[in-house]
Structure formats: C-alpha cells, structure tokens
Image (cartoon, rainbow, N blue to C red):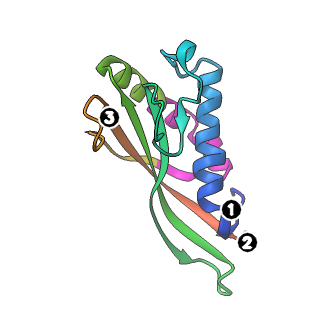
Amino acid sequence: MAQAVPHDELSAQIVRDLLRDELRAAVADGTIDDPRAASRDDEMVLTSFPDESIVYPLVIVDEANDASDAIHMQRVAHQHDYDVQISIAGDNKTHVKILRDQVRGWVLSNAVDLAGQGFMDLSIASSTPAAFEDRDRALQWQFTIASNVITGENPA
C-alpha cells in the first residue's frame, strides 16, 4: 500500500513534488525532449502559466478536481478521487503533439512508481485540444489524469 499524504500537503506533494519534479527530471535526462532547451532560462515544466518571458513549449501541471470521503472509522484517513490536469502549450503543432505523446507516455510508463508514492490507480480520464485565453499564438493540448490518493494516517 502507498504511504498516505498529509491532509495539508495533498497538492504540494502530488502536483509539485511528484508530478512536476519527476517530469522535470524526465526532461533533464532526455526522456522528454525540450526543443528550446538552448534558449530557455526557466524550466519547461511548471505548475502555473508564466506571467511573462514565455518560451514555448511549456508543460503545466495543476490540480483539476478533488473529492474525498473518510475511509477510517475515526476519520483519520480520507480517500480522494484526485485529478491532475497536464497542459501542453506551444507555438508549433509538431512540438505540441510530440511533447503530448512523450508526457502521456511517461505518465503511463511510470504508473507503478507513481502509485508507490501515493498517486494510485491512475488513468487518462480525458485528452483534448484546447486554447489558452488571451494567448492567440499558443496551441494547447490538455489531458486529465484521474487517480486515488489517501491522505491522513495509513488505515490499519
């Protein structure tokens, strides 16, 4: 069984520490290609869209939905239906499509490792093209990863 995540650290541990940081490591080791690495000062994988100095493509990891119920009689543990949205933004269709496939492939290939760190029973719930508001040049693809996460104390 995966370790429970503290109630007050759910998004920090799953979105930031697990998914964002592990995707950054995959970019650093070449598993996921950053076609603009040479001209980029900041990271390609972020948890929010930057306000300025945008260098496409970008991968944005963010919480999409969370619903939970107590799973322990003393309410010390909760099971969350926890969804994370990953958005791929770029100014080039080819970069967006390649990056989308690489990121989705990384998520699915690492499902067992992610489950061991608390992001369990993951599945791709949806995968759709979209457009950023107020960003006419940007192309976007987003997909939602549905999962289960236990918070609180590990139930006995």
Q: Quadrant of residue 99?
A: top left
Q: Which residues are magenta?
A: 104-122
Q: Which residue is mark 2?
A: 153
Q: Residue lying at the far top in this picture: please name it.
A: 38
- Residue 118 lies in the magenta stretch: yes
Cβ–Cβ under 8 Å for marks 1 and 2: no
- Tag 2: residue type? Glu
Q: Secondary structure at mark 3?
A: strand
Q: Residue at x 35, y 40 (%)?
A: 142
Q: Which residue is mark 1?
A: 5
Image quadrant containing the C terminus: bottom right
Q: Main secondary structure of the magenta part?
A: helix
Structural distance between the alpha carbons of marks 1 and 3: 31 Å
Q: Residue at x 60, y 77 (%)?
A: 71
Mark found first going from the N terminus, 1 or 2: 1
Task: Give percent across and percent down for residue 70.
Answer: 58, 79
- Tag 1: residue type? Val
- Residue 106 lies in the magenta stretch: yes
Q: Which residue is mark 3?
A: 140
